[in-house]
Amino acid sequence: MMMETFEHILLFKTNISHDADKLALGNLLKQTPEIEHWNIDMEDEDRVLRIVSHGLTHSGIIDLLTQHGYECCELV
């Protein structure tokens, strides 16, 4: 049986705190074709953003979000 790896799942702590921010973030991420799926846990104190992508890196996502005024750092 082959084990699935999770290297393509990127996790971030963000400052997304309002539904309007979540909507704006969604519109931004939809414009990035390398993102296969994303979600954000608005209930978690870290506002955890999970991105599934086989082509992007943590630093690429952090750059993208900070360019648009969001705070974002990798969760390890």
Image: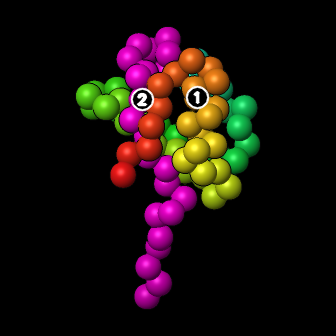
In this view, 70 is above or below 55: above
**Residue drawn at the location 63% of the way across and 43% of the way down:** 60
Q: What amino acid is labelled 2 in the image?
A: Thr
Give the x, y percent position of residue 21. 50, 16
Q: Earlier in the sequence, mark 2 or mark 1?
A: 2
From the viewer's perspective, tell me whether residue 44 is left or right of residue 34.
left
In this view, 48 is above or below 25: below
Crowd tier of the residue under label 1, counting other residues whose Cα lies within 10 Å: few below 14, some 14–19, many 20 or above: some
Give the x, y percent position of residue 72. 47, 32
Q: Which residue is mark 2?
A: 14
Crowd tier of the residue under label 2, counting other residues whose Cα lies within 10 Å: few below 14, some 14–19, many 20 or above: many
Residue 7 lies in magenta, yes or no?
Answer: yes
Q: What amino acid is labelled 1 in the image?
A: Leu
**Residue drawn at the location 64% of the way across and 50% of the way down:** 56
Q: Which residue is mark 1?
A: 65
Give the x, y percent position of residue 6. 46, 64
Label 2 element class: strand
Contact, CB < 8 Å: mark 2 with mark 1?
yes
Residue 51 lies in magenta, yes or no?
Answer: no
From the viewer's perspective, tell me whether residue 37 is left or right of residue 39.
right
In the image, which residues are magenta?
Answer: 1-22
Residue 53 is labelled as none
**Residue drawn at the location 58% of the way across and 44% of the way down:** 59
Locate residue 75: give its quadrant.
top left
Q: Please say whether residue 29 is visible from this viewpoint.
A: no
In this view, 71 is above or below 35: above
Give whichever of 23, 10 is nearer the camera: 10
